Amino acid sequence: MNIENIEAFVYAVHLGSFVKTAEALYLAQPSVTARINSLERELNVKLFHRKGKQISLNEKGKIFLPYAQQILHSYQESKFKLHQPINTPDILKIGCASSISNYIIPEILPSFKLKYPDVNVKILTGHSNDILDKVLNKEVDFGMVRSVNHFQIESVLYRHDPIGLFAYSNHPLLKRNEVTIEEVSKQPLIYFDYGSVDWLMINGLFESKNLKPNIILEVDSMEAAKNLVINGMGISFLPKHCVLAELENSRLFHVPLSSSSSQLDVKIDFIYRKGERRPSFIDFFTNK
């Protein structure tokens, strides 16, 4: 079966005339008519109702249309894949912690698409533990998370991500050159991402001093935590990469913790299943 005849048929259906089909395919109108006639002879059925220059699908044409579209799609897809590098996947699935998908992926993905324009990228988001599950279940090619550990995964460091304490404008702690964790414990605190590595580190900071923080609210949304602080609900420990815009616009302010209280740092890692070949695209991002 001639693929050009099928192509002319599909175009004619969607454009509604042989004349418009000829224009779209850069052909003379008689050539389009000849292709349709050839296809009908091969199938031994008529596919269109014809009335002057107007055409419409008949019942046989309606039956044939989905098969013609599938044949044409398969042909075009095979042509595309034949011209791709052998080891380059056509879809890259990356699992990302929500804060990473919001603030880091937009920074690193444009250069990737410049180098690999034909690779379609699909981003799946969730908490770091959700992404860990997706990696283990082979739902994604690799994950990008904030410090998770599991005996079945390998980790590749992308970068360190300091955690800071942030407050709204005119908060009394901003008047101090240095703030202790004891002083912080007395302030209304908004906790982000309960149970995460960030949360465990922050909680450990208070526990090391036998302090009980004044937690007024726990949220699982970075944007919610930031906006609650901006609107004066309290202060919050947040990853620094997530508040750059708010710092620049003077909507949030960094609280200067004392040196004994400021060693909060989380790693951002790429993760993949142990025992499997390291995904090649990880090297692209880590070598930037």
Image: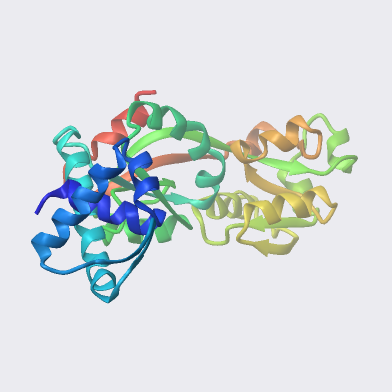
Outermost residue toward the top in this view: 288
Q: Quadrant of residue 40?
A: bottom left
State the residue in front, 179 or 167: 167
The image position of residue 73, as x and y in percent, is 24, 53
Q: Residue furthest front?
A: 52
Q: Residue at x 27, y 47 (%)?
A: 272
Please say which color scheme the image uses. Answer: rainbow
**x%, y% of residue 189?**
74, 55
Q: Give the residue at x 37% y 41%.
A: 24
In the displayed structure image, the side of residue 201 where residue 112 appears, left or right: left
In the foreground, 260 or 39: 39
In this picture, is 190 found above or below 121? below
Along the viewing direction, whichever of 268 and 135 lies nearer the viewer: 135
Residue 201 place in picture, x, y as percent: 54, 49
Write the residue at 22% across / 46% down: 76
The quadrant of the image that shows the N terminus is bottom left
Residue 266, relative to residue 116: is it above or below?
A: below
Which quarter shows the C terminus? Answer: top left
Whether residue 90 appears in this view of the structure is no
Tell me if residue 114 comes above or below residue 42 in the rendering.
Answer: above
Q: Report which quarter residue 139 is drawn in.
A: bottom left
Q: Nearer the viewer, residue 279 or 178?
A: 279
* Residue positioned 34% across, 61% down in the render: 133
Q: Is residue 197 visible?
A: yes
